[in-house]
Image: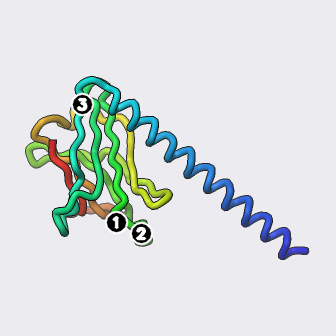
Amino acid sequence: MMDLARQRDQATQQRDLARGEAQQLAGVAGTLDALLAEPGHRVASLASTATGHAVGSVVWGPASSRLAVVTGALAAPPPGTTYRCWVERDGVRHVIGQMEFGEGLAYWAGWVDPASGIGPGSRIGVSLVRDAGGGAPPPVLLASF
């Protein structure tokens, strides 16, 4: 009996995780749709710094101050680390969020403070950082506006 109850609990947990992941992905898709419909939106290719190949996209809506970063090129980070998104202008970085993972995609979408300097001449990057913090690690993914 205990094994059956344990299996049910595991199935319930997996279902709840899948639902949460689906809601997050739907939110990112909705943000992308809204940004692409926004007049004056900008799209930039997100490139791997290791290969130089385009591996994702960054969409920015200057009117709404929203940004979305999407790639299929990142595996989940090792324990004790996260992928952080940032905006860099004139050599100054502003962390804007942490990449989430689901269904083979890594993504972040949200509002970006206009004071971060996002706009023409800025760079959007993703770096692997230790949860304990420390420094400004090199980007693994990079886009420029």
Instruction: Please say if the residues under marks 2 and 1 sit with CB atoms less than 8 Å apart.
Output: yes
In 3D space, how far apart are the residues under numbered discs 3 and 1 (Cα atoms)? 27 Å
Residue at which label 2 appears? 80
Label 2 element class: loop
Instruction: Please say if the residues under marks 3 and 1 sit with CB atoms less than 8 Å apart.
Output: no
The image quarter containing residue 44 is top left
Indicate the colouring scheme: rainbow
The kind of residue tagged 3 is Pro
The kind of residue tagged 2 is Gly
Q: Position of residue 87 (x, y in %)?
A: 22, 45
Q: Is residue 117 above or below residue 126?
A: above
Q: Position of residue 47 (x, y in %)?
A: 21, 57
Residue at which label 3 appears? 114
Q: In the image, which is nearer the foreground, mark 3 or mark 2? A: 3
Label 3 element class: helix
- Disc number for residue 93: none
Q: Does 94 sit left or right of 29 as displayed?
A: left
Q: Within 10 Å of the Cα at label 1, are there few (<14), some (14-19), or many (20+) other Cα atoms?
A: some
Numbered disc total: 3
Residue at image x 27%, y 62%?
134
Residue at which label 1 appears? 130
In 3D space, how far apart are the residues under numbered discs 3 and 2 (Cα atoms)? 30 Å
User: Going from the N terminus, do you reach mark 3 or mark 2 first?
Assistant: 2
Instruction: Please say if the residues under marks 3 and 2 sit with CB atoms less than 8 Å apart.
Output: no
Q: Is residue 68 above or below residue 53?
A: above
Q: Within 10 Å of the Cα at label 3, are there few (<14), some (14-19), or many (20+) other Cα atoms?
A: few
